[in-house]
Structure formats: C-alpha cells, structure tokens
C-alpha cells in the first residue's frame, strides 16, 4: 500500500438512504416529473414515468424528438425503468407536455409523477414466472390515474409487479404484487394472498392505506419505510383497507426466491442489452427503435429488452451485432454490468467530481470487484442500489472514499487519490 495515496481505516458507514430509514419530511416532495422540471447545472431535467418501462416504438421516437429538440439529445435511463431528459431550457414545459401528451405518455397530469411502477421485463416472453403480468400492469396504471387519493403519493413511491420469478424482490418497492404458483397473487405490505383478478386493485388499496397511515400519524412521508410503523401495524392497515374494498385475502408467507435481471444477449423470446451508465445517445436510441418490432421494455437495471416477435431486422444475431456496434452491451462478461454512477459533474452542482468519466477510466483498473461499484459525486449517493455493492464516493478535497454497502457492523473505508488506485482500495476493504 502506498502511504499518502491509499489508506484503509475503521469508519462509520455512509449515511443510510432515506428509502430505508424513518424520516420526518418538513417539505413537500420536489421529485421532478414531466410537468415539474428540476433545475440542474446542465439545464432543466424532466423525468418521464413509464410504468413497467414499456414503450411503443412510436412513443420511443417521440422521446427522441423531445431530447433532440429540447434537451441535450441523449436519453438517460433511471433505476426505475423511467427516462430523464436533461439540458432542457427554462420555459420549455408546455412544449414538452404537448409533445408527450400527443404520444400517449401523459395520460393524467395529476398523476404523472406517481406512476412509478417496475415490472418483470421478460414477463410473457421467455416462459418464466407464473403469468404474464402485463394485464396487471395496465390495470394498475389505469387505476392509479383514476384515483383521487393517489394524487397524494410522492414521486418516490414505488410499485413492483413481479411475474413470480422474483426479479422485483430486491428493488425495495413500497407495494409489491407477485404472481403465485397457485394462480393467485402475494401482496406486500400485508403479506397476504389475493386473487389474480384483484391484484391491481389490491396494490392500489395498499398505497391508499399508506396515505391514511401517514395522515393518522401526522407525518409527511414519501415511502412506507419512512412512516416508522412496525411491519405488523402496516400489515393490519392494509388488510383493513382490503376489507373496506371488498377484496378477499388470506395470510400468506413471502414467496421464496430472488432472481436477477435479464442478462445481455439473446434470451428466450427477446433480446437484452445493457446501457453503460444508463446514458443513450441519439444514435443508440435510434438503433434500438429501428431494431424493435412493436415495443421496447426499459429495465430497472438500466437495460433494454426487445421482444423478438415482429422484430424489424433479419434475426437475433444480426440485431445484436448492430446494437453492439452502436456501443450497447451485448456481452454477459462486460465489466459495465457491474458499474453504476450518478450524474456527477458537470450536471450536478453538489458533485465533487466527474464520476462518470472517472468510472470509465477505472473500468479496467478495477478488475473483478466481486460486488458492483456505484460511483457518487457526493454523500447523497443519488440512485445508489439497495442491494450489496461498493460505494465509491467523491471526497470534497479530491479522490474517492470506498466502503461496502450495506455496511457490516465493523465497516472499513479505503481512500483512492485517483481512479487508477481503485483496485488497491478495493483490496483494502475486502481483504
């Protein structure tokens, strides 16, 4: 170890995510949307919610037009399968809303920020899971947009729709419906079984129970975990809400099994690609749209799934070659699969470094870290994963602080003065 360049020490764990810790919010939710833009250092930012990450090719082309005419030309994928447009000029909100509304991407102005729904991206394509959950996804979104109560949800509240394979289990959703082998659905909070027919309505009821609980406790909470109530109490509130809605239910343990997202390459019924750091150039987006048949499915792992049925190209091999040539990841051994980052400089004034450029420079130097690396420009660690990973956080005076997360009871932190020292820093905290 080089003294003065790399140090390892006992240290307190990084501050926990607000998504995992009870919190008292003293202001309203400022999460950006399509109609409420966020002022960033590189211009205004819009976040377009895409329930289940599902886009028709026509909608995908409309997003490309919006990015090209109004933004920086790129499309930025989020960890919830949504799309962000960056570099927007102030005062473009009306033009953006008109463009997206015409493409069917703004079904309810009152609910556009609360349509946060992730869903198993391979559902109905590869024969996995217990059912095709697309009907659940459509019904839940329709119900959300029709619910006056749901307007009170924050832009951070998350629904997950799992086809039974367990790929949504590690995403920390506030409300989950998961298909069961017996044809029903498991609902959380509440840990109950409901009928498949009632699953979308039950998910909305659970969200409305959360809103009632926040009001009764006098809290302005954005996520279920911020209420500070026990799992048993939240479950009781959900079951009471189901009873009021005439939704039959019975206690059911959480289904076993957690699955990863689709790997890059050809999978049964689809092609899957990974987008390095979630940023798609106009050319890459155009290639995806041209290859796709009728739709694209954006994943919570910053990837894209293209159903092969009706695909516009000559075959899977040709399509993958074309997408790989455009710079998208089609190789399951790519180191990009284990690297994530916030926007960093110059897009964020709070960031201490251009973390994306540094992550790219350190890609080969890091070797095989064993755990995914997530690069953050500051201690807020925006967008960091909830699963096990290594935090690489830019320090105010330069360099990076590395620590494993979630932290163990006796965490260790290492410091790398520049990206070339990442491998040594990793060894210091894992040895």
Image: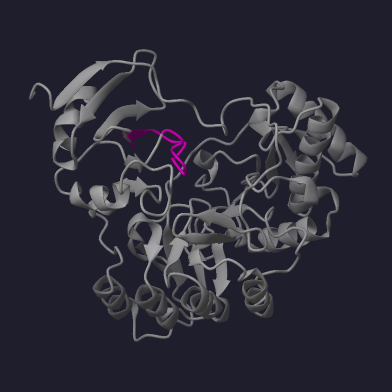
Q: Is residue 299 above or below residue 8?
A: below
The residue lying toward the viewer, choosing from 100 and 261, is 100
Q: Is residue 131 above or below residue 372?
A: below
Give the left or right position of residue 61, taking residue 8 as reference: right
Give the left or right position of residue 383, taking residue 173 as reference: left
Q: Position of residue 28 (x, y in %)?
A: 71, 41
Quarter of image, res 323: bottom left
Q: Residue at x 54, y 59 (%)?
A: 82
Residue 193 colored in magenta in the image: no
What's drawn in magenta, residue-wise? Answer: 379-393
Q: Is residue 34 above or below residue 244?
A: below
Residue 388 colored in magenta in the image: yes
The residue lying toward the viewer, choosing from 269 and 233, is 233
The residue lying toward the viewer, choosing from 414 and 397, is 397
Q: Residue at x 36, y 61 (%)?
A: 275
Q: Residue at x 39, y 43 (%)?
A: 351
Quarter of image, res 34: bottom right
């Amino acid at each position: 170890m080089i003294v003065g360049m790399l140090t390892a020490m006992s240290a307190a764990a990084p501050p926990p995510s607000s998504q995992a810790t009870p919190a008292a919010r003293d202001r309203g939710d400022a999460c950006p949307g399509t109609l409420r833009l966020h002022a960033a250092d590189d211009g205004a930012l819009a976040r377009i919610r895409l329930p289940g990450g599902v886009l028709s090719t026509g909608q995908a082309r409309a997003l490309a037009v919006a990015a090209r005419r109004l933004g920086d030309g790129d499309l930025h994928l989020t960890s919830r399968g949504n799309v962000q447009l960056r570099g927007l000029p102030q005062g473009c909100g009306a033009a953006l809303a008109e463009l997206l509304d015409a493409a069917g991407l703004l079904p309810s102005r009152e609910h556009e920020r609360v349509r946060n729904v992730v869903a198993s991206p391979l559902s109905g394509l590869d024969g996995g899971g217990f059912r095709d959950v697309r009907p659940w996804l459509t019904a839940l979104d329709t119900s959300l947009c029709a619910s006056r109560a749901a307007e009170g949800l924050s832009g951070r509240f998350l629904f997950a729709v799992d086809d039974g394979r367990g790929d949504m289990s590690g995403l920390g959703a506030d409300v989950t419906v998961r298909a069961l082998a017996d044809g029903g659905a498991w609902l959380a909070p509440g840990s109950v079984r409901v009928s498949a027919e009632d699953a979308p309505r039950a998910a909305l009821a659970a969200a409305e129970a959360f809103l009632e609980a926040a009001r009764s406790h006098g809290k302005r909470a954005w996520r279920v975990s911020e209420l500070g109530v026990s799992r048993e109490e939240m479950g009781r509130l959900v079951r009471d809400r189901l009873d009021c809605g005439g939704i039959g239910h019975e206690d059911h343990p959480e289904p076993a099994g957690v699955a990863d997202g689709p790997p890059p390459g050809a999978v049964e019924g689809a092609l899957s690609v990974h987008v390095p750091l979630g940023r798609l150039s106009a050319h890459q987006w155009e290639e995806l749209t041209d290859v796709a048949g009728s739709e694209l499915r954006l994943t919570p792992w910053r990837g894209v799934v293209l159903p092969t049925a009706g695909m516009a190209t000559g075959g899977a091999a040709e399509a993958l070659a074309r997408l790989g040539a455009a710079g998208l990841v089609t190789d399951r051994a790519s180191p990009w699969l284990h690297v994530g980052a916030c926007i960093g400089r110059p897009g964020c004034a709070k960031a201490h470094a251009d973390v994306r450029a540094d992550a790219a420079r350190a890609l080969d130097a890091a070797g095989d870290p064993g755990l995914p690396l997530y690069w953050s420009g500051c201690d807020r660690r925006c967008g960091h994963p909830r699963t096990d990973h290594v935090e690489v956080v830019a320090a105010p005076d330069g360099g990076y602080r590395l620590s494993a997360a979630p932290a163990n009871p006796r965490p260790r932190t290492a410091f790398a003065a520049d990206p070339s020292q990442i491998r040594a820093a990793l060894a210091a905290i894992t040895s």
